[in-house]
Image (cartoon, rainbow, N blue to C red):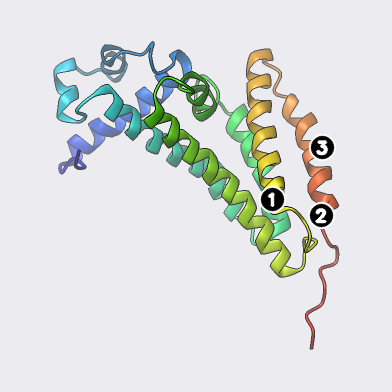
Amino acid sequence: MPVPKTAKARATRARLLGEAAQLFSVKGYFATTVEDVMAKAGLTKGGFYAHFESKEALARAVVEHAAEMWAAKIVAHVMSFGEPRAQLHAVLDGYRAYAVDRTFEGGCFFVNLSTELDDQNDDLRRLLDDRFEQFRLLVMSIMESGKAAGVFAPDAPSDAVATLVVATLTGTMMLAKSSRRWERFDESNALLTRMITSFEIDPPSSPST
């Protein structure tokens, strides 16, 4: 469905996406109704189909909206550092802030929905999987940039490191949410930091002359 043309329509659509993202993170996709979203947004159900052709269309748009929220919290923080080693450590700090600040009321939107939709809706599952892969690729690209800059060991396994970082952060999110113990991130991030540091070269190799 095309992006609304008027400022009022765009604002309404953004409100729907924001409220749906929070409801999906708390109640889940299947337990959340269109009526729930419209009530939360302070709108009547009749206006829903002016913006989305179905609940699944809403969900697809919500995934994109949630990805933008995630990027604003984590990617923007990571990119504020110019050096690959600092960027990789910023991934850990940024994800911890994303969790502790309750960017989504129910915890990580992506972790929650991927668990719920695992074998229920293949189209949405693939869309969520793509977001996790983008996270992995972010970590991989930082590792590769660091190897090219001579600050990470040339034999550092970028792919495996990226998988471990993403798996540990998202797994810690689930543990911290269920136990309400956000210090779990301090424990797991300390171990991830030790792992990352083991691949660092300090000082970086001097360029050949």
* Residue occupying image coordinates x 71% and y 54%: 86
Q: Position of residue 209 (x, y in %)?
A: 79, 89
- In the rendered image of this protein, does residue 83 appear above or below residue 11? below
Q: Position of residue 164 (x, y in %)?
A: 70, 39
Horizontally, residue 208 falls left or right of residue 136, namely: right
Horizontally, residue 149 falls left or right of residue 3, namely: right
Horizontally, residue 25 falls left or right of residue 186, namely: left
Please state which amino acid type lies under the numbered disc 3. Leu
Horizontally, residue 36 falls left or right of residue 183, namely: left
Mark 3 vs 2, N-terminal side: 3
Q: Which residue is mark 1?
A: 88
Q: Residues within 10 Å of mark 2 (few under 14, many from 20)?
A: many
Closer to the camera in the image, 137 or 172 = 137
Q: Position of residue 28 (x, y in %)?
A: 44, 16
| Distance of label 3 from label 1 (alpha carbons) | 14 Å
Mark 1 vs 2, N-terminal side: 1
| Distance of label 3 from label 2 (alpha carbons) | 13 Å
Q: Which residue is mark 3?
A: 191
* Residue occupying image coordinates x 19% and y 23%: 48
Mark 1–mark 2 CB contact (< 8 Å): no
Q: Which residue is mark 2?
A: 199
* Residue occupying image coordinates x 64% and y 38%: 166
